[in-house]
Image (cartoon, grey):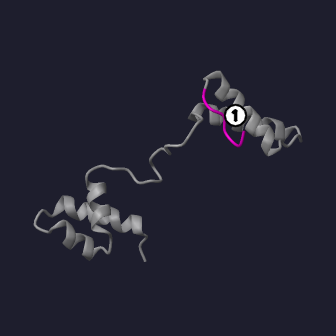
Amino acid sequence: MLSNESRIILALEALKNNNTLSLRAIAKTYSVSAATLLRRRDGKPTRRDSLVNSKKLTQIEEEAIVRYILKLATRSFPLRLYSIEDIANQLLRIRDAPPIGKL
């Protein structure tokens, strides 16, 4: 059985290759939502592939925190959650951004 994503990709290919069928007919044939198919045809990315609106740290800042955590973990020094939160808040303070977590 095909996953929903696979069926959407196949339906998009069918839309591209066959102009005689309607979007709804292809959606019904491939058992996918017509609205989803329409959004994908118009180029809107999946939720998984789009950035979260409430993300406070940049990708580089997140990667720096992960590298720091891994560096300390290799030295057998596991960090607590509040320590990681403090690191993130220090990075946010540099940019004058609001802190994460409860105040």
Q: Among all residues in the image, which is located at the extreme right?
A: 76
Q: Residue at x 58, y 37 (%)?
A: 56
Q: Residue at x 80, y 38 (%)?
A: 83
Q: Which residues are magenta?
A: 97-103
Q: Residue at x 74, y 39 (%)?
A: 85
User: Residue 28 falls in which quadrant of the image?
Assistant: bottom left
Q: Residue at x 19, y 73 (%)?
A: 25
For residue 35, above or below residue 41: below
The kind of secondary structure element at disc 1 is: helix
Q: Which one is in front, 16 or 64? A: 64
For residue 16, above or below residue 26: above
User: Residue 16 falls in which quadrant of the image?
Assistant: bottom left
Left or right of 24? Residue 97 is right
Left or right of 86? Residue 15 is left
Q: Position of residue 31 (x, y in %)?
A: 32, 75
Q: Quadrant of the C terminus?
A: top right
What residue is pinned by disc 1? 88
